[in-house]
Structure formats: C-alpha cells, structure tokens
C-alpha cells in the first residue's frame, strides 16, 4: 500500500517529504507519484543535511508523526508500512 494511492486516508493530515536530492529530482518524484496538486503534501530540499542532524534522522526513510499539538507521537527509522502510520493518525 503506497501513500499516493491512499491519500484519501490522509485527508486531514499534513505530509512533508524531506529529501537530500535536488529540487529538480524532487519535482520529478512528486510528478511521477501525482503529489504536485495535493495541498496537504509538501516537499523540502535539505541539501545541507540539517534535518538529519536536528532530528537524529540517519536512516532513510525516516518517518515522524506529530499530533495537532505538535507533539511527537511516533517515529520510524527505515521503511514502514502505511497501515502502521495510519494507526497513529486521528481519523474523522
């Protein structure tokens, strides 16, 4: 199960992809997986690796789940199934 094929389950969720790739490569990825027109999906380029230092994110992918109060709910180092992410989201 992929995020791009299940965006309806993330309707009340802000998704932020952070990449070390160039902006051009990020746009290619976003276009390929049909994220460009999604208002709840953002892409950030972290070419200086600031994110990995600040969040101790030395695994790729690295998933952080925050609640609406900006409190960390769960983090995953490495690949994670969508079902595991969804169980931490408040679904209305």
Image (cartoon, rainbow, N blue to C red):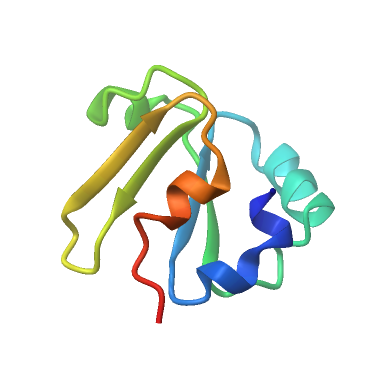
- The image shows residue 13, relative to residue 4, as above or below, that is below
Residue 32: x %, y % from top left: 83, 51
Residue 11: x %, y % from top left: 52, 76
- The image shows residue 28, relative to residue 38, as above or below, that is above
- The image shows residue 7, relative to residue 85, as above or below, that is below
Among all residues in the image, which is located at the extreme right?
32
Q: In the figure, is residue 30 to the left or right of 42?
A: right
Most foreground residue, 57 or 74? 74
The residue at 24%/29% (across/down) is 54
Q: Quadrant of the C terminus?
A: bottom left
The residue at 73%/60% (across/down) is 5
Q: In the figure, is residue 31 to the left or right of 78?
A: right
Tell me where residue 9 sits by quadrant: bottom right
Among all residues in the image, which is located at the extreme bottom?
92
The residue at 27%/23% (across/down) is 56
Label tally: 0
Residue 76: x %, y % from top left: 38, 32
Q: In the figure, is residue 67 to the left or right of 83?
A: left
Residue 1: x %, y % from top left: 69, 48
């Amino acid at each position: 199960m992929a995020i791009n094929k299940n965006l309806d389950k993330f309707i009340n969720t802000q998704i932020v992809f952070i990449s070390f790739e160039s902006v051009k490569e990020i746009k290619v990825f976003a276009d390929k997986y049909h994220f460009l027109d999604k208002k709840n999906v953002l892409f950030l380029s972290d070419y200086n690796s600031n994110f990995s230092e600040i969040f101790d994110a030395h695994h790729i992918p690295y998933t952080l789940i925050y609640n609406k109060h900006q409190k960390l709910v769960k983090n995953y180092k490495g690949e994670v199934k969508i079902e595991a992410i969804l169980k931490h989201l408040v679904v209305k």
